[in-house]
Image (cartoon, rainbow, N blue to C red):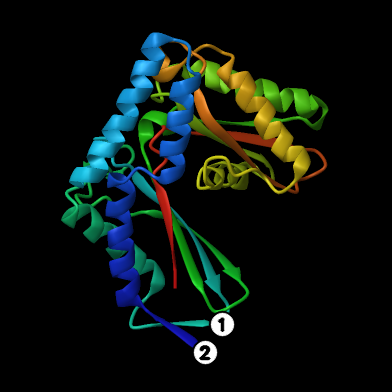
Amino acid sequence: MKTVDCSEVIEAVRKLCIHINTNMSSDLQKVLLESINKEDAPLGRRILEDLLLNGQIASRNGIPMCQDTGMVVGFVDVGQDVRIVNGNLSEAIQEGVRLGYKTGNLRKSVVKCPIRRGNTDDNTPAIIHYDLVEGDNIKIHIGAKGFGSENMSAVKMLNPSDELKGIKNFVIETIKNAGGNPCPPIIVGVGIGASFDKVTMLSKKALLRNIGERNSDPFIADLEIELLEEINNLGIGPQGFGGKTTALDLHIETFPTHIAGLPVAVNINCHASRHGEIIF
């Protein structure tokens, strides 16, 4: 049986937290370059150029792309044939986040109580979702989610009679209401189906997909492209100053649901799209 030592998990998560906050991914750089060439609005094009430059400077100097270095959200696939030694997996991930934000000089943004507040001073606890899968690997995929975009996200329990049109209307209305608040260009994660709690998790998980990576279901993939085009026709543009680059991509994740339900969640991410994975 394969074994994974918790000390390895701690160090890998620590490094990943720093990396995703200070390095612009290649897929993001590519789509920003493409958007610069396509953007007709002069101010919008200048903003896109500045965002790309900002990411390049951050990567070169090892500094955060944004002052909001986010709350860590993780999706962990644990192989049923792997053995974890010298500790507890959850505690190891939390320790990796704690050390990453401390040694990387990343802003600590988590408060102990949502009402009484009080900073935890180490950006923990992270939010971790687990899935038990076949095999002997552990895959840890984490994202650093800033709340300028998180605060503009929404969930709605539609009726089945609302059908596809209702889903499209809710997604577009959510982006309209967000306007320039989530620092567009944005990446949009959409969850459809399941239940009230799981649909929001689906929308978050959708944000961890690489830019340009379509859903494996051709029908859903076509819907992703259609909604992305509609969003970019809204005219919100980079940072809300107008233009046709409101969103860089849109990803949809679905799950079976009850015959009486049609849950839909929209989770908005800023252009930084900070995420990465480790496999043991």
Observer-nearest of 268 and 280: 280
**Callout 2: few (<14), some (14-19), or many (20+) C-alpha neighbours within 10 Å?**
few
* Dot 1: element: loop
Q: For the residue marked with disc 1, what is the amino acid?
A: Asp
Relative to 125, 57 lies left or right? left
Q: In which quarter of the image is residue 22?
A: top left
- Viewer can see residue 71: yes
Q: Name the residue under label 1.
A: 81
**Callout 1: few (<14), some (14-19), or many (20+) C-alpha neighbours within 10 Å?**
some
* Dot 2: element: loop
Quarter placement of the C terminus: bottom left
The residue at the far bottom in this view is 1
The residue depicted at 40 percent of the width and 45 percent of the height is 25
Residue 196 % position (x, y):
62, 41
Relative to 229, 145 lies left or right? left
Q: Label 2 to label 1, Cα distance in Å?
A: 6 Å
Query: Quick check: marks 2 and 1 in contact, CB under 8 Å?
Result: yes
The residue depicted at 30 percent of the width and 24 percent of the height is 50
Observer-nearest of 220 and 32: 32
The residue at the far front in this view is 37
Q: Decide: is 267 above or below 126.
A: above
Residue 234 % position (x, y):
56, 13
Q: Residue 1 carries which label?
A: 2
